[in-house]
Image (spheres, rainbow, N blue to C red):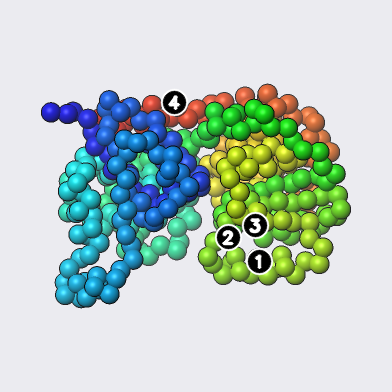
Amino acid sequence: MSTKKRILFFTKDLNRTGAEMILFNIVESLDRSKFDIGIVLMQQGGELVPNLPEDVNLFYLESTFTLFDKIRFHLGEDVMLNRLKKIENEFKSDIWYINTIPNAVILKYSHHFSAYKFLHIHENLFGIGHLSLADTEIILNKVDHYIACSSIIYNQLKCLTQKPCSTITSCIDKNYIDSCLINFTSPSKNKIKIIGSGTICQVKGVEIFVEISKLFDPNNYEFVWIGKWSKTGYSEVLRRNIDSIKNPAIEIKTSISQEEYIHEIGSADLFLSCSREESMGLVMMEAIYCGVPVLATDSGGSSLIVNDQNGKICFDSRPEVLANEVRTLIENRNQFDPLTMRESIEKYDGPLEIQKLEIILSKI
């Protein structure tokens, strides 16, 4: 009889967002002599799905309902529970590993199954005000073991629960970035390039980034934000704000490949993070690894990464103050040595963190 643990990962769609990339690296790297792996996607698709290892069992937990499903529901059948049971009957998991808080809604069905339940939290716990009390109680009561993406989240968890908590620090894929940059030469340009990245939402402070761009001459500066629009009123208001600018210095790029993304970062003169809160801040780490200095607001996660070897944290988020800091860092950007910048984030080692996770999973 096999002694391998059977781990069923739950995640959204395996697109190239930070949390999904972390999960992909975990799944790709776990020792197959110790673990059998399945992944449940809440949405079909995902840019990383075709790259999954062949031995990963892939399932879709359909969240839409046909007319027949609705009739069955009104007759007393729990359609979602039965879909989960079908997956479990096939995979027979020992461990559920749920990636990010939004996917933790699946825990309301967990008492029907015997699997040990992990929740990997990538979000700031004080930023989940959009959740109902019922969903928050599920997160706090139905989990067996929490995985925090940084020391910041670990400290928050220890104030909230007596259940086991571990820190598996989120890290970038340095080998992949190296492969993208090996033959890359930054194109010649006649403008200073300021770049930002992340889903276009209030947490990322994209409207601050836009307001800063208005304070620079578009003939000499270009501001580029890379990220997808969130389906929110915030995005629509921001989109109309940008459209109202007569001669904008800003460009929003929503559809580029991961390699193109690294090239965009690598060709910048400065990375600007205007986030209101960050649990870790992988995009800042990517910029630093690419040799691009970072100016960041005091978002929590920025303090784990940004220092005088690779940039600066600004404790004032007013656009005019940040604009002055941008000018100062641009004038002094040659003081940042690329090798020293890489060394400043050397302690964040992806393979080492996954080894730590393997030890935790093996003990269950």
Instruction: Determine whether, in the image, residue 239 is placed left or right of residue 22.
Output: right
- Visible residue check, residue 317: no
Q: Is residue 152 left or right of residue 261?
A: left
Name the one closer to the observer, 193 or 55: 55
Image point (27%, 27%), residue name: 34
Cα separation between marks 3 and 1: 11 Å
Q: Label 2 belongs to which residue?
A: 229
The Cα–Cα distance between marks 4 and 3, rounded to whole angstroms, is: 33 Å
- Point out the image quarter for the N terminus: top left
Foreground: disc 4 or disc 2: 2
Return the x and y of residue 244 as percentages of the image width and height: 75, 70
Under circle 4, the secondary element is: helix
Amino acid carrying label 4: it is Leu
Kind of residue sitting beneath label 2: Trp
Q: Residue at x 71, y 51 (%)?
A: 224
Question: Are circles 2 and 1 on residues that touch, CB within 8 Å?
Answer: yes
Residue mark closest to the camera, 3 vs 2: 2
Residue closer to the observer: 4 or 101? 4
